[in-house]
Each structure stands twice: as structure tokens, then as C-alpha cells.
Image: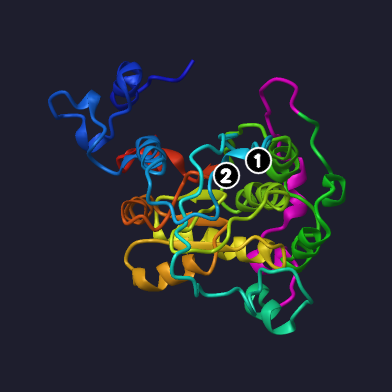
Amino acid sequence: MPSRRSDHNQTVWQEKMSGYVPPHRRNEAGGATGGSGGGGSLEALMQRQSMGSRGGDRGGGYGDRCGGYGDRGGYSDRGGGGGGDRGRGGGGWNTRANDAFQPGERSSRWELDIFGDPKPMSEKTGINFDKYDDIPVESSGRDCPPAVTDFASLNLPDVVTLNISLSGYAKPTPIQKHTIPISLLGRDLMACAQTGSGKTASFLLPQITRLANIEKPPPGRRATPLSLILSPTRELTIQIYNEARKFCYRSGIRPVVCYGGADIREQLRDLERGCEMLVATPGRLVDLIERARVSVGCISVLTLDEADRMLDMGFEP
């Protein structure tokens, strides 16, 4: 039973059945029915885009293949439906040549740029992860898989295992030991842990592993990511993206970051080069969808980082 020890929590509890109302709209008349203000509804955007994609302005080529991936599961286990909307008319999209994320030989130049100095994670962060082993972790749910003790037990792709080593991880942190096996099964998951505990890697590693087995959409004017990671602030979004670059190195999964307060033209060009994993803030995501430059019809894995903060900012599920 959720705790209701404050007026704020009491309000949220009473309005639960009529829809979430962010704090800045709770004094408005009829606020409980809101859906068009604030950050908008992600599900409504997906529904509108799915309906629009059934029209006749598809450029051909990719069709409805997004809906046929089968058991794709993930953090939210969303179905793929909706199809791909990439226009192929003009051709000449930027290629992925010399891209650090495409399979190929290792490059010391890329590795220095992405991973920095080859130091253990404890030296990079100043955190002694050995002391984390005694931290208790509570798991709830039906048939939760047992925690693992090392990354080798996860049977991750070789390139991902190498990227873990290049990132400075020697062994998984407590949250990684428990959450990665669950996510690899394609089950929904909600996790809470302190800052610096390895949460970002705990949701990135299963995503990359699962996306590696999914057919990739071709690049085009409208990006069709397979994974969407939302976070409330530019700083956190950039932080997640920098971690994604490390684990996606040479994996065939290309991450792209999009956030407000930066030149959108550069972000659009980056999207056109190809995007399997999109890391974005809610406001910029809505902007890109409304510009018809991002399609969410092929999303198979959805991650909300600091979801409670996004709700308070007015971005509705």
C-alpha cells in the first residue's frame, strides 16, 4: 500500500483513477482530465503517429517490418506495431562509414575517444565497489531469476563483454546482478538505487544484447529507433548517452542523443546517419515527432530514467 503521509501524496492517491496531474496543474479546474498540457502524452503521440503511418505518404521500401519482430520484450515489453515511415525518395543519406558503432576491427583512436584512459571503474569514480557486495537488495515479482555473480554468467555477446572490460567494470554491482538477468528475459522492471550504483549499465547492457538480434531499419530522413531512453534533464541525457557509446562500440547498435538547448540541425543530421537507440529529453522528443523526423512505431524497449521527476515536470505516460 503506498504511503500517504503528506498532502502531496494524498492528492496523487485520490486522483490516481482519473489520471496523473502534475503539481503545476493541480489547482486548475478540471485538471484531473488533462492530457494536452505540460509535456504531452507519450502514448497519445504514439497512437497519432501509428494512425498517420497508415496513410499513403510512405516512401516505400521498409513497409511494416517493424511489426514482425516477434518476441522482442525489453524494459517495457512493448509490441512493435505501427510500421516504419522512412521516406527513401531522395537517396543519398549519410552513410555509416568510419562509424565507431559498426562491427569491425578495434581502433585505438575510437577507444581513446569513447572510453578515455584505461582505468578500473573504482579509480574513475572514486567508488570502492567491493563494499557494495554487502548491500541488501530486495526483489519482488513472480519467478524472478537468481542474481548473477559475474558478467560471464550473463552470456552476453563477445563485443559487449569486451566493452564492459574497456569501460573499467571488473564485476557487476548489486543492482546489475539482480536486474540484468530479469531484463534479458524481456520482463518489465522498476528499479531504485542510489546514485553511482551502476543503474545506467544495468538497463543498457540488456538492451544492446536484445537489439543485436533485431533487424535494423535502414537510415533515412525519419529515424526509426528500436530503443527509446527518456530522462528529464539535458545533463542526465548526455550522461546516459556517453555510457551508451561505450557499450554500443562495434555492436551494430548506433546511439543518438537529442535534447533541448542545442542546435537541432546537428541532431537531425545525426539521426539521419542511423539510430537504433535514441536517448532524449521529453520536450525534444515531442518536437522531433511533430516534425516527422522520429518514428516511435518500432520501439521495442522503453526506459524511463528518473520517471518520477518527469511526471512532476508534466510529461504524462
Please check the rendered image and state whether residue 134 is part of the magenta-colored stretch, yes or no: yes
Q: Depth check: give the residue in front, 156 or 4.
A: 156
Residue 34: image x %, image y %? 23, 30
Give neighbour class at mark 1: few <14, some 14-19, many 20+ (Cα, 10 Å). some
| The residue positioned farthest toward the left in the image shown | 29
Judged left or right of residue 271, residue 200 is right
Q: How much space separates mark 1 and mark 2, taking CA atoms?
A: 7 Å
Q: For numbered disc 2, what is the local secondary structure?
A: helix
How many residues crowd mark 2 within 10 Å: few (<14), some (14–19), many (20+)?
many
Residue assigned mark 1: 69
Observer-nearest of 23 and 35: 35
Count the numbered circles shown.
2
Residue at 44% x, 20% y is: 3
The region drawn magenta spans 117-144
Q: Position of residue 210 (x, y in %)?
A: 70, 46
The quadrant holding residue 267 is: bottom left
Magenta stretch, overall SS: loop
User: Which residue type carries mark 1?
Assistant: Tyr
Left or right? Give the position of 246 relative to 130.
left
User: Residue 16: which quarter of the image?
Assistant: top left
Find residue 230 and report its horizontal and vertical position in percent.
Answer: 46, 49
Residue toward you, 1 or 30: 30
Q: Is residue 226 left or right of residue 173?
A: left
- The three-letter code of the residue at mark 2 reads Cys
In which quadrant of the rendered view does residue 102 lie?
Answer: bottom right
Give the residue drawn at x 38%, y 19%. Answer: 4
Tell whether position 268 is magenta. Answer: no
**Labelled disc at residue 66:** 2
The residue nearer to you, when weighing 132 against 254, is: 254
Can you give x and y, in whole percent of width and height, for residue 71 in the image?
69, 35
Circles 1 and 2: CB distance less than 8 Å?
yes
Vertical side of 293 occupied by 313: above or below: above
